[in-house]
Image: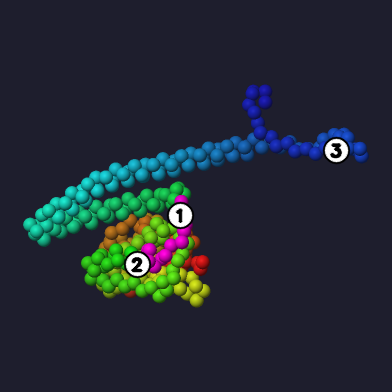
Amino acid sequence: RADGVYKWFLVRGVPIMDASGKILKWFGTCTNINGLKLVEQELIKAKEKAEESDKLKTEFLAQMSHEIRTPLNIILGNAEYLNDSFCDKMDLDARNCFEGIDLASKRIIRTVDLILNVSELQTSGYIPDLRRVDLHSVILSKLYQEHQLSAKKKGLELIYTCKDKDANISADEYSITQVFANLIDNAIKYTEKGKVEILLEKNSTGAIIVKIKDTGIGMSTEFLPKVFDPFVQEEQGYTRSFDGNGLGLALVKNYCKINNAQIEIESKKNIGSTFRVTFSKG
């Protein structure tokens, strides 16, 4: 243009030739695409800005995690030392105080971990390491042992039944461990009496199925469609009577997707819940 500003045009042309192949003239179109190119450039800038924002958010959360974890680990270490050193001299109230410090600190660490994991998934920062994993011996058996104490403290029976020990799957070990750790944690957390069952079996097609069943508070039919949404909890029970941030099941759903697994839930209020995770055969 005369003012020195360039504009974008899309030019298309085809030659008109005679019988000998000599070009006589050109026929074509010239379309002003300046508006489209400007929009495209704005979209590219917006994408780059969003990516930079995600990067900064991830770096910020990682730094905050470090800042929170470091003093908490010092508190936990010192509390454990004092507890071990003076346990025989403390009364019940003092021992309960130390147990409260331990539980509260670990709860904060778990919450930080959940926030970081969800953020990592949202920014596509998590890269799964898919390999053959023995679901029975490497994951479920260990989680069963790890959760025995927490179940016993609540007077609950924790049962693990493996109907087929040939349970090798292609999965990311870390994320699939988190799936079942969260489901078992929740089952124990929201069950006041009765039992929590872990069942590993295969269906008629050979697909591996893991069920986590509890006799806990359950969920209403109206709430079930929202159960895997982040930051969502059922008002009665889940928010008022129990601690939680509503991130655990959202993370479980995303981790199942990463591992090509399907998760389903059946639940009845005041009766209990059953989570079913199905892995494709092969």
Residue 144 in the image, given as x and y percentages of width and height: 32, 67
Q: Residue at x 55, y 39 (%)?
A: 44
The image quarter containing residue 84 is bottom left
Number of other residues with Cα within 10 Å of mark 3, as a class: few under 14, some 14 to 19, many 20 or more: few
Tell me the residue that label 2 is attached to.
141
Q: Residue at x 88, y 35 (%)?
A: 22
Residue 43 vs residue 196, the one in the foreground:
196
Tell me the residue that label 1 is attached to.
129
Residue 194 in the image, given as x and y percentages of width and height: 28, 74
Region rendered in magenta = 127-140
| Residue at the farthest left position | 89
Secondary structure of residue under mark 3: strand
Tell me the residue that label 3 is attached to.
16
Identity, as a three-letter code, of the amino acid under mark 3:
Ile
Number of other residues with Cα within 10 Å of mark 2, as a class: few under 14, some 14 to 19, many 20 or more: some
Identity, as a three-letter code, of the amino acid under mark 1:
Asp
Q: Nearer the viewer, mark 2 or mark 3?
A: 2
Q: Residue at x 70, y 37 (%)?
A: 10
Q: Is residue 264 left or right of residue 1?
A: left
- Disc 3 and disc 1: Cα gap in Å? 58 Å
